[in-house]
Amino acid sequence: MFYLLIALVVVLDQVMKYYIRTNMEVTESVPLWEGVINLTSHRNTGAAFGILEGQQWFFILSVVAVLVGVIYFRSKGEFKGRPLMETGVALLVGGAIGNAIDRVVFGAVTDFFDLQFMSFAIFNIADVAINVGVGLMILSMLVEWAKASKNIRREGDA
């Protein structure tokens, strides 16, 4: 399931980016839901919110480091019995691979979701996967911390 989720994120991300690159001019915008969200063709050479613009090798090396770390920790069984953590890591990896493909092949990440009801950066499926993945990883750590704290208190009461 872990690798299937990674593949699903990468495929959905790349299919949508392909559609945007082949059917829309850069800066072209089409409402999906009037006043809520547009599809806006945008290219980003930086990270989230455009930070570290033009640092492609930094991002590519970061993805390689994350992949090596995930392979190592997964081989050690670190995610076994931790479904929130495993799902979060799979989403993070899938998103990182999706954006890395854009950086290597096109020199910039294709972004397209453009929220209209608030001022926010234009983003893509990989970005959503990365952020949801990190959120699930944090939630997993909080749940594990709460369980450990509860067990420590029980042992202290005995």
Image (cartoon, grey):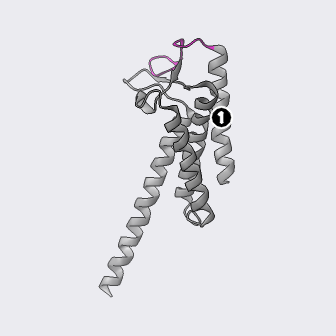
- Residue 22, percent from left and from top: 67, 16
How many labels were placed on the picture?
Answer: 1
The residue at which mark 1 appears reads as: 12
Residue at coordinates 43% horizontally, 20% vertically from top-left? 116
In the image, is residue 115 part of the stretch drawn in magenta?
A: no
Q: Is residue 34 left or right of residue 106?
A: left
- Residue 124, percent from left and from top: 54, 30
Farthest bottom residue in view: 158
Quarter of the image for the C terminus: give it: bottom left
In the image, is residue 39 part of the stretch drawn in magenta?
A: yes
Q: Is residue 82 left or right of residue 119?
A: right
119 w.r.t. 2: above or below: above
Q: Secondary structure at mark 1?
A: helix
* Quadrant of res 60: top right
Q: 106 or 11: which is nearer to us?
A: 106
- Residue 9, percent from left and from top: 63, 40
* Quadrant of res 99: top right
Q: Residues within 10 Å of mark 1 (few under 14, many from 20)?
A: some
At label 1, the amino acid type is Leu
15 w.r.t. 26: above or below: below
Q: Is residue 49 left or right of residue 80?
A: left
134 w.r.t. 148: above or below: above
Farthest left residue in view: 157
Q: Give the magenta range.
A: 24-40
Q: Is residue 1 left or right of residue 46?
A: right
- Residue 59, percent from left and from top: 51, 37
Residue at coordinates 47% horizontally, 42% vertically from top-left? 131
Quarter of the image for the N terminus: give it: bottom right
